[in-house]
Image (cartoon, rainbow, N blue to C red):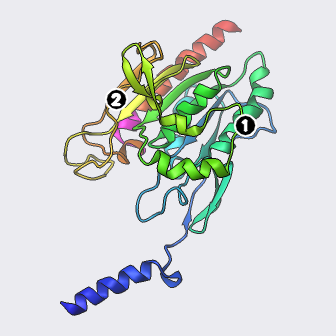
Amino acid sequence: MLRSVSLLLASVLCMGAAGCAPRIMTVAAPRSAPLNLDGPAPDVVVLAMSGRCGPPCRAPRDNRDVLSARGTLDAVADSIAAAGYRVQVAGYASHPGANFSSPYVQPQQRGFGGLWADVQRMRSTWLRAVRPPRLVLLGHSQGGPWLHFLSRVTPEVPYALQIDLDSICVAWKGDFTGLIAQNPLPAELPSPLAACENMDTPVGRRNAKDIVWPNVARNLEVQSKRLPTRPGEAGGVYLNYLFEVTPNVRPDGSTTGIERFVAWKEDHSAVSAPGSESLTWVTIRTNDLARRWKIEDLRQR
């Protein structure tokens, strides 16, 4: 018994020692064409914000662009490209800074500050064109509140589609209060802490992450399973540990342009997996929407 306790204690101490440091996680880039603001505009830009990393990583220090590495961003981009569009993508990690580093994550990651800068640059260039590119927002977990905050503080920027994969505000203030002070955004913007504040609507109080702003044309919302069930083909756990339950609404309380899918077998992580029922639901609808865009574009020529 004493030997078992000693081994357990040694393992715990080892986890905190330099010689037992976690392995470095290399974040793979998406295979889709990367956002290139120095070149000609594509037809569609997909901007993806990943969520809070889980154990054994230390959030928010080790947050990373999982949607790119996992293939989620590529799956959405492919569904749009299949309609005949040229698509560029960019992925970001849940962090207020423009760029940030972790000793255990390579390469350096880009956070909300980088996303903000990219959107501002598009505003001054591509979005001034007669036919500007359509912007699509894709967020998972803690990435969802960041993107709802983005659309809220850029009311003059039209977003063709916003995709929410189980958006949650878990640990928002604890993770970001100090980092926001260290990584200030322009003074005219509200604090990103407001991304998870409660707001009044005609249908009652709603968290800001559950409000789809008027400059967002369409919204697809996925919520993970609520009850213990055997995981589906996308994997996951029997008992889901995090899940969203509140349906998205417009500021006027309506659900115009909003569709929702509640998974029965997929947990908080699995809803973002390529091939999952949840992401398949998203990509089918995204492809349908892109085909409608194509018809609209042909009529305007």
Q: Is residue 27 above or below residue 259?
A: below
Helix, strand, or loop for circle 2? loop
Mark 2 crowdedness (10 Å alpha carbons): few <14, some 14-19, many ≥20: few
Q: Residues within 10 Å of mark 1 (few under 14, many from 20)?
A: few
Q: Residue type at mark 2?
A: Thr
Q: Is residue 78 visible?
A: no
State yes or no: residue 278 in magenta: yes
The residue depicted at 37 percent of the width and 42 percent of the height is 271
Q: Residue at x 68, y 37 (%)?
A: 116
Disc 2 or disc 1, which is closer to the eye? 1
Q: Is residue 210 left or right of residue 243?
A: right
Residue 295 within the magenta-colored segment of the rendering? no
Residue 186 numbered tag = 1
Is residue 268 left or right of 26 when viewed as pictured?
Answer: left
Q: Quadrant of the N terminus?
A: bottom left
Give percent across and percent down for residue 26.
Answer: 57, 63
Q: Nearer the viewer, residue 249 or 118?
A: 249
Say which amino acid is labelled 1: Pro
100 relative to 280 in the view: left or right: right
Image quadrant holding the C terminus, namely top right
Q: Position of residue 77 (x, y in %)?
A: 56, 36
Find the magenta span and give its range: 273-280
Q: Looking at the picture, tell me which residue is in the foreground, 145 or 180.
A: 180
Please name whichever residue, 180 or 251, is drawn nearer the observer in this view of the structure.
Answer: 180
Residue at the far top: name it.
Answer: 299
Give the CA separation, mark 2 to mark 1.
Answer: 31 Å
Q: Earlier in the sequence, mark 2 or mark 1?
A: 1
Q: Tell me the number on the disc at residue 246.
A: 2
